[in-house]
Image: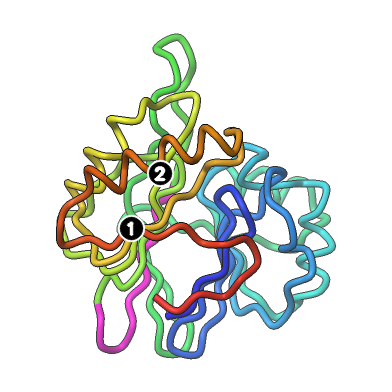
């Protein structure tokens, strides 16, 4: 597969002829120029994962792309009405894009604080013709799918985590390849500290790679 990072949690995955964009949020850059999409997928409603200011232009530039989100986000976007019709993909549901199957799992955002409500968060798994769970985007969660994942978008920094947690998560999932996401809240120095620690403590069977923004990378 080919993966392009647009910073923070926004990534373009090209797999088996399908072009799928995840989480175009307000801490991401460059996604607004992407065309030829087959799908736009949003994990949850927070603005760093769904930028309501730039989504309309993205959707207008990709009128044939299907649009899926968690239940709460789909309801919000459909109520807005300026970004077309959004379908819900929840845990246990799936749809196909040519040879790719997109599956929903997980369901809940990580706990930020016990006094704050926990919102919906759909975890997306992509199945290629020759590889089940070829890619996983967990959004803001540490959901473990209990199946072998080939490439993992790894949440590496957030107000709701400490560095030991992405280490434990990548160990639990044990993908062939992991790359960090959700680092738009960090300074360059902070990203370096976190990424170095994760790389040091990941499973020996996992390749940890940091994607350059806007550069397509074969994984």
Query: Within the image, what quadrant is residue 164 found in?
Result: top left
Query: Which label is found at residue 10?
Result: none
Main secondary structure found in the magenta portion: strand
| CA neighbours of label 2 inside 10 A, class few (<14), some (14 to 19), many (20+) | many
Residue of label 2: 195
Percent across and percent down for residue 199 are: 30, 48
- Asked if residue 179 is positioned above or below residue 130 in the image, the reply reads above
Question: Which quadrant would the N terminus be assigned to in this image?
Answer: bottom left
- Asked if residue 188 is positioned above or below residue 54 in the image, the reply reads above
Residue visible at 61% across and 66% down in the picture: 40
Residue visible at 82% across and 70% down in the picture: 60
Question: Would residue 44 be counted in the magenta stretch?
Answer: no
Considering depth in this image, is 162 or 118 the residue closer to the camera? Answer: 162
25 vs 190, left or right, is right
Residue segment shown in magenta: 122-131
Residue of label 1: 208
- Asked if residue 158 is positioned above or below residue 92 in the image, the reply reads above
Percent across and percent down for residue 107 are: 37, 43
Mark 1 element type: strand
Query: Within the image, what quadrant is residue 216 found in?
Result: bottom right
The type of colouring in the image is: rainbow
Verify CB contact (< 8 Å) between mark 2 and mark 1: yes
Percent across and percent down for residue 154 are: 38, 50
């Amino acid at each position: 597969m080919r993966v392009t990072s647009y910073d923070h949690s926004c990534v373009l995955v090209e797999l088996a002829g399908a072009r799928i964009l995840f989480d175009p949020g307000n801490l991401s850059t460059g996604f607004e120029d992407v065309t030829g999409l087959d799908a736009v997928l949003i994990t949850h409603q927070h603005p760093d994962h769904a930028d309501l200011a730039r989504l309309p232009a993205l959707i207008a530039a990709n009128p044939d792309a299907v649009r899926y989100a968690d239940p709460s986000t789909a309801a919000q976007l459909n109520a807005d009405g300026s970004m077309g019709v959004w379908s819900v993909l929840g845990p246990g549901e799936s749809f196909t894009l040519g040879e790719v199957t997109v599956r929903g799992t997980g369901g809940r955002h990580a706990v930020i604080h016990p006094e704050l409500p926990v919102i919906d968060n759909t975890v997306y798994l992509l199945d290629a013709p020759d590889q089940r769970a070829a890619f996983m985007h967990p959004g803001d969660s540490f959901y473990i799918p209990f199946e072998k994942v080939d490439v993992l978008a790894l949440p590496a920094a957030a107000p709701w985590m400490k560095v030991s947690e992405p280490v434990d998560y990548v160990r639990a999932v044990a993908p062939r390849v992991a790359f960090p996401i959700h680092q738009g809240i960090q300074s360059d120095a902070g990203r370096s500290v976190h990424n170095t620690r994760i790389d040091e403590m990941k499973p020996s069977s996992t390749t940890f790679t940091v994607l350059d923004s806007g550069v397509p990378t074969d994984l």
